[in-house]
Amino acid sequence: MRAIHYRLLALVLLFTMPLSFAVAQKSAKAAAAPAAATPDNKLDINTATADQLKAFPGIGDAYSKRIIDGRPYTAKNQLVTRGVLPESVYNKIKDSIIASKPKK
């Protein structure tokens, strides 16, 4: 009787393992893709994650939180005009970011 259980378990594992690997690979690819990146490889400050923002020079936990808390932005220069970032930090990242139009 135990031999039948072990064979059934082996069959179940044989058929389910490839599915679990496929799901894991798909999840890894989705996590690797930057969700807020635009086709021209600029990061959208309205949708970027804190980790994506912190990848920029001069942006740490505090500035990434301030950027996220200040959303939405209609123009990227609002990071300076609203006092979210100092101009010196903004100048380091301005060519790598955009502010998409907020969705209604």
Image: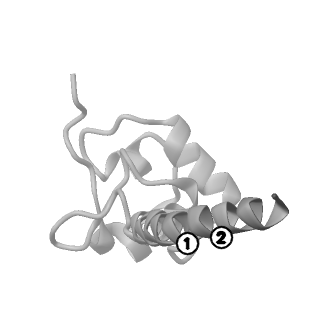
Determine whether, in the image, residue 79 is placed left or right of residue 61: left
- The image's mark for residue 10 is 2
Image quadrant where one finds the C terminus: top left
Q: On the picture, is 52 further left or further right than 101?
A: right
Decide if residue 86 is on the left or right side of residue 100: right
Q: Tell me the distance, in whole angstroms, between the alpha carbons under discs 2 and 1.
A: 6 Å
Residue 82 x/y as whole percent: 44, 39
Residue at 46% in and 64% down: 19
In x, y percent, where is residue 2? 83, 62
- Tag 1: residue type? Leu
Residue at disc 1, secondary structure: helix
Residue at image x 22%, y 46%?
100
Q: Which mark is residue 14?
A: 1
Helix, strand or loop at label 2? It is helix
Q: Is residue 64 above or below residue 20?
A: above
Of the pair 29 and 79, the residue shown nearer to us: 29
Q: Position of residue 61 (x, y in %)?
A: 68, 58
Q: Indicate the amino acid at tag 2.
A: Ala
Q: Quadrant of residue 78?
A: top left
Seen from this angle, which residue lies furthest front? Answer: 1
Q: Are marks 2 and 1 in contact (CB under 8 Å)?
A: yes
Can residue 38 be spotted in the picture? yes
- Given residues 36 and 27, the one toward you in this image is 27
Above or below residue 50? Residue 100 is: above
The front one of 65 and 80 is 65
